[in-house]
C-alpha cells in the first residue's frame, strides 16, 4: 500500500508568515510527514525537523533521503519542549552560560524537571548530552546537523520556527495507537511510546471528578459529568481497553448529532492529557523566542481553544516579540473543501525584536573548531 502523506494546512500563509528565503535556517518543531518542511526546502531553506513520534521521523527520513544526505535537513526525535537542550548540543559548552539574554533567570529555571542551559554549562548533567564534564567532546548523535547553514555561530539564531499543533493523517489513521475511534485499537494515544501513562490508564484510573475536569478543561465536552459517570460505571464491569469500548460508552450518553461523532472531544481531551500538549507548548514558546534571530519569525498553528489562548497571551505579553497578526489567520473555503481538517486551524505569527541575537555572545568565549556549519563544534 502506498502511504499518503499528510496534507499541511495553511501552507502558503505559513511560508509568507515565516518569510522563507534561500539559505535561511528554520526549525520545524512538529515535522510530522514533512509537509511544511518540503516547501521550506523547495524555497532553499535549511531545516531542523523535530517530532516526538518515531514513526513520523522514520517516514520523513525516507521521504527526504536526498535532502538529508546534502545536509539541507536534519531530523531528530524529540519533544519541542526540549529546544534549549537540542541547540545546547551544538554550542561550545564553555559559552552556554551566555546562551540567553537573562542568564540569572535561566540559571534557576528548569524545563519539566530538566536542567536549564546554565545548569548544563556547570557540568552537572553533561553526560546526558554526550559531553564530557570538561566540555571536551560533544556528542556526534546529531552529526547530520553539521551542514546546517554555513553561517558562523556568531551571526544569528534561527530565521523562523514553526509549530503545527495538529495531528497528522498517519497518526490518526495508521498508527495503531488509538488516536481515533474509526478503528478498534488499543486505548494508548501516546505520541512517544516511551511515555509512561496511556489513555487506558487515565480512563481506568482517574476518579469521576478528575475525569470530569479533564473533559471540561481539554475537550469542552458536552455533559462531561454524565460521560465521566458512564465511564466509571462501565469500568466496574470490566476495564476499558479499546477505542471501540470507550466510544460506545460515550455514544450512549451523547447521541450522535450531525457529522461530529460524540466521542470526538473526549478522545481529544485524553490525547492532550496523555501527551501534556498544553504544558509542552507553554514550556516551548519561551525557548523558541530565545532562539530567534533578529527579526526572525515564530509561527504557531493551533487547533484547540486552549492552545490558541496560550499562544495569543504569550505573543502579547512577551516584550521580545512583536505580534504580526492580531487576529488569527484561518483557512479559506477552497482549502477547507479540499482539506476539511483545516477548518479549525488558527495561525498566529510573531517577530523577534530587532538586533535580537542570542548566538552573538558565543564569540566572546573560546571558539569551537569550525566545520563550516551553522554551529561550532568541539571535537
Image (cartoon, rainbow, N blue to C red):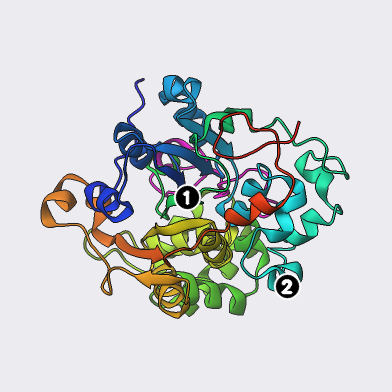
Distance from label 1 to label 2 (Cα)?
23 Å
How many numbered callouts? Answer: 2
> Toward the viewer: 314 or 332?
314
The residue lying at 41 percent from left, 44 percent from top is 172
Which x, y percent locates residue 178?
Answer: 50, 46
The residue lying at 49 percent from left, 79 percent from top is 225
Residue 154's place in the image compared with 23, above or below, is: below
- The residue that mark 2 highlights is 104
Which x, y percent locates residue 125?
Answer: 83, 51
Question: Looking at the figure, which quarter contains the N terminus?
Answer: top left
> Toward the viewer: 103 or 65?
103
Question: Looking at the figure, which quarter contains the C terminus?
Answer: top right
Which x, y percent locates residue 163?
Answer: 43, 54
Helix, strand or loop under label 1: strand
The residue lying at 32 percent from left, 66 percent from top is 255
Q: Left or right: 326 with respect to 29?
A: left
- The residue that mark 1 highlights is 158
Helix, strand or loop under label 2: helix
State which quadrant residue 321 falls in: bottom left
Is disc 1 in contact with disc 2, using a CB cutoff of under 8 Å? Answer: no
> Toward the viewer: 257 or 301?
301
Q: Left or right: 77 with respect to 98?
A: left
Which x, y percent locates residue 11?
Answer: 26, 47
State which quadrant residue 36 falls in: top left
- Span of residues in magenta: 173-197
Q: Left or right: 134 with respect to 223?
A: right
Magenta region includes residue 3: no
Magenta region includes residue 190: yes
Amino acid at each position: 500500500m502506498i502511504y499518503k502523506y499528510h496534507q499541511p494546512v495553511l501552507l502558503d500563509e505559513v511560508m509568507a508568515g515565516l518569510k522563507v528565503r534561500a539559505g535561511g535556517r528554520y526549525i520545524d518543531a512538529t515535522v510530522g510527514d514533512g509537509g511544511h518542511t518540503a516547501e521550506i526546502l523547495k524555497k532553499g531553506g535549511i531545516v531542523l525537523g523535530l517530532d516526538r513520534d518515531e514513526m513520523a521521523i522514520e517516514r520523513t527520513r525516507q521521504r527526504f533521503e536526498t535532502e538529508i544526505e546534502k545536509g539541507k535537513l536534519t531530523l531528530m526525535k524529540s519533544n519541542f519542549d526540549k529546544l534549549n537542550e537540542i541547540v545546547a548540543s551544538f554550542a561550545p559548552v564553555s559559552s552556554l552560560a551566555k546562551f540567553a539574554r537573562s542568564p540569572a533567570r535561566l540559571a534557576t529555571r528548569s524545563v519539566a524537571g530538566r536542567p536549564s542551559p546554565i545548569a548544563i554549562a556547570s557540568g552537572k548533567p553533561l553526560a546526558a548530552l554526550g559531553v564530557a564534564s570538561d566540555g571536551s567532546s560533544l556528542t556526534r548523535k546529531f552529526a547530520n546537523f553539521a551542514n546546517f547553514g554555513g553561517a558562523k555561530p556568531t551571526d544569528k539564531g534561527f530565521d523562523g520556527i514553526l509549530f503545527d499543533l495538529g495531528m497528522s493523517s498517519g497518526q490518526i489513521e495508521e498508527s495503531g495507537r488509538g488516536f481515533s475511534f474509526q478503528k478498534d485499537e488499543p486505548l494508548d494515544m501516546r505520541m512517544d511510546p516511551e511515555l509512561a501513562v496511556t489513555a487506558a490508564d487515565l480512563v481506568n484510573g482517574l476518579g469521576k471528578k478528575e475525569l470530569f475536569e479533564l473533559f471540561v478543561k481539554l475537550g469542552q465536552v458536552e455533559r462531561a459529568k454524565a460521560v465521566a459517570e458512564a465511564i466509571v460505571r462501565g469500568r466496574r464491569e470490566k476495564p476499558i481497553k479499546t477505542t471501540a469500548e470507550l466510544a460506545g460508552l460515550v455514544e450512549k450518553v451523547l447521541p450522535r448529532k450531525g457529522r461530529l461523532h460524540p466521542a470526538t472531544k473526549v478522545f481529544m481531551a485524553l490525547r492532550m492529557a496523555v501527551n501534556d500538549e498544553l504544558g509542552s507548548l507553554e514550556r516551548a514558546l519561551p525557548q523558541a523566542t530565545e532562539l530567534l534571530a533578529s527579526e526572525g519569525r515564530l509561527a504557531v498553528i493551533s487547533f484547540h481553544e486552549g492552545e490558541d489562548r496560550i499562544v495569543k497571551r504569550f505573543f502579547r505579553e512577551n516584550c521580545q516579540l512583536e505580534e504580526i497578526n492580531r487576529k488569527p489567520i484561518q483557512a479559506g473555503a477552497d482549502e477547507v473543501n479540499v482539506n476539511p481538517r483545516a477548518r479549525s486551524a488558527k495561525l498566529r505569527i510573531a517577530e523577534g525584536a530587532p538586533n535580537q541575537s542570542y548566538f552573538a555572545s558565543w564569540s566572546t568565549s573560546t571558539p569551537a573548531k569550525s566545520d563550516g556549519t551553522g554551529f561550532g563544534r568541539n571535537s
